Image: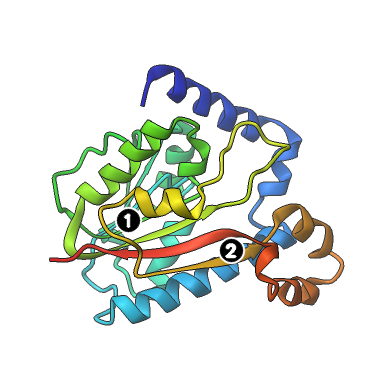
Amino acid sequence: MSKDELDRIRAVYTARQEVRTADRYRGDAPAEVHALARRREMFRALLGRWLPEGLSGQTILDVGCGRGSRLAEWSDWGAEPSKLVGVDLMPSLIGNAKKSFPKSSWLVGAGDRLPFKNQYFDVVTQSMAVSSILKTDMRASFAAEMWRVLKPGGVLLWYDFHYPNPFNPNVLPVRRGELNSLFPMPPKEVCKVTLIPPLARLIAPRAPGFVRYLECLPFLRSHHVALFKKEC
């Protein structure tokens, strides 16, 4: 990534950590709890279908890992903590991950220059990292690096939003056409998930069951979960 874009992303996430509006992104917020649970459901279902041998012994990379909690939960699914690797641009988040999950590996770095050799990981994943990049060529570089470090026969899991957010100029949706173009082959599976966050934040604290009902309407789902498999 260019230095200007890296500096912009760092500034956005630093501000998010410092101001109270970051409360909406807290993991214990009702809407966030529901969205994370649905993402877990989809990831586990996809892994069950496309990685039937399970996660034991698999090397797993999360690009844009944040504080590490998303990746660390993979140990509950059969992954070995020592095989989990997270990369994030923010040193403070990586510091938190190291303290919370010391058995795994956590590195400060940019997604378009991953410090790993070719075809190193069995599973590569990203959640809401690419939409934080505004420049198209940098998104392509990010995706190319994810693909480069993935082993033949490995799987790549994707979670990001496809609807524009007019209230946040610091993110840009990844629409289906762009998603298909980022990798050398189309996804094996892709589906829409996650109730539009502003609506979920309004409803989830008052009527959590209604969130699941509204998610049945495809036009109210704002994110894509996708699985790509790197053919041998």
What residue is disc 1 on?
Answer: 103
- Residue 155 found in image quarter: bottom left
**Which part of the image, by quadrant, shows the C terminus?**
bottom left
Which amino acid is tagged 2?
Answer: Leu
What residue is disc 2 on?
Answer: 36
Circle 2 crowding by C-alpha within 10 Å: few under 14, some 14–19, many from 20? some
Left or right side of 165 for 151: left
The residue depicted at 83 percent of the width and 57 percent of the height is 202
Q: Is residue 107 visible?
A: no
**Which part of the image, by quadrant, shows the N terminus?**
top left
Q: Position of residue 65 (x, y in %)?
A: 43, 48
Which amino acid is tagged 1?
Answer: Lys
Sequence order check, earlier mark of 2 and 1: 2
**Is 230 drawn above or below residue 44 in the view shown?**
above
Residue sitting at the far front: 177
Mark 2 element type = helix
**Along the line of sight, the residue nearer the viewer: 12 or 213:** 213
Mark 1 element type = loop
**Is 138 drawn above or below residue 50 in the view shown?**
above
The residue depicted at 33 percent of the width and 45 percent of the height is 143
